[in-house]
Amino acid sequence: MPVNLNLDHITESIGLDECYEAVIESKFDPCDVESFQAIGPLLKKLNNNQTFLSDILIAELEEHCASQSLTNRYTPQVIMLKGAQKGINFFMRANIWLPKSDPLLLASGEKSFFYRVPHDHNFNFLTSGYLGSGYHSDYYEYDYERVVGYPGEKANLRFIEHKQFGQGQIMLYRACRDVHNQLPADDLSVTLNIMPSMMFSHLHPQYVFNEQCTEVERTTVTTNGSIEPVLYLIAQRGSGKGLDFVEHLAQHSIIEEDRFRAIKALTSVQSSKEGKLNVLEKLGLKSKSKLVREMTKSHQAALGYV
Ligand SMILES: [Fe+2]
């Protein structure tokens, strides 16, 4: 369960710039739960400011969302408040949580807004309930070190509790430990986040679990998600040099999932079943990584080569 910070006694309110500068000044360590918790009061003070977000939205609309276009790589659910910057170890954002009756939610589906997508995070982050009665969540914990991460693997999540994250609450999500299955809010809700800018967070996968929260469904990464089509392109159009590069990645990438992505790309180049099976056998099924072996088995089955 994320760490609940009871900061109801803080009634002071500050602006976004003031909060941002104070968090920089604090020199907090986003990898350390206690250090991250220590900046909770600053987020609470910003959270008490119930006008700053609408001021930002008005300014954005007047400028045709110029600032968001430059800094925001998220879906429209997210408003970037302070984007990632060189030399600064965090960024700030606001998230919109639509109620279950909202026409946009009904049209796009709940999963488009991360509802009913149980997941963990590979970083700590601080969050506050800024507006509305908040999203509901079923909270779980699990042992990250005991999970290899291939689809279908039993994850042994332990249910902790159900909670609604309403206005004024502050929580710290703990990396690779807290899992939440978010359910639609009852009314339009907004949360604020202080997020770490983690250079190496993609080295730790974060997981999406199945809806029953019994097994790993897939891994998800936020920083190198576009590598798969790039590897396909290099493997298919990069001549011998390209194939050598992708094979090297398939054997030596520090990110196990990228090894598997490279194997998939090399498999796609082979025109015959025998050729594909050779690649899968040599690079995937004989890999030292259990994750690569298990993902290769799944891919082999998906190709119909059982
Ligand atoms: Fe989440």
Image: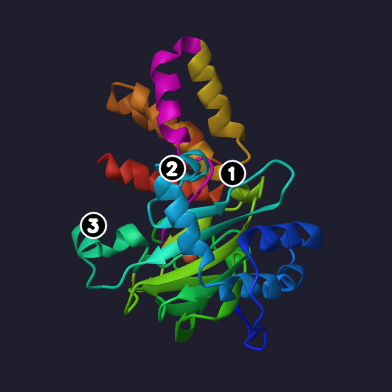
Counting residues from the N terminus, which is met first, the one under dot 2 or under dot 1?
2
| Scheme of colours in the image | rainbow
Residue type marked 3:
Ser
Residue name at image x 63 percent, y 40 percent: 254
The tag earlier along the polypeptide, 1 or 3, is 3
Residue 24 appears in the picture as rendered: yes
Provide residue 210's location: percent of width, then percent of height. Answer: 36, 66
Query: What percent of the width, then of the height, locates residue 184?
Result: 33, 73
Residue receiving disc 2: 63
Badge 1 amino acid: Lys
Select label 2 or label 1 by which is in front: 2
Tell whether 13 sits left or right of 87.
Answer: left
Q: How far apart in space, not on screen, are marks 2 and 1 (Cα)?
A: 53 Å
Query: Residue drawn 69% across and 71% down?
Result: 42
**Do we see residue 2 in this rendering?**
no
Question: Real-space Cα distance between discs 3 and 2?
Answer: 27 Å
Residue holding disc 3: 108
**Crowding near pointer 1: few (<14 within 10 Å), some, many (20+)?**
few
Please state the horizontal and vertical placement of residue 4, each as a whole percent of the image. Answer: 61, 82
Q: Are marks 2 and 1 in contact (CB under 8 Å)?
A: no
Write down the residue under mark 1.
Answer: 288
Q: What stretch is highlighted in magenta?
A: 216-240
**Secondary structure state at the residue bearing disc 3:** helix
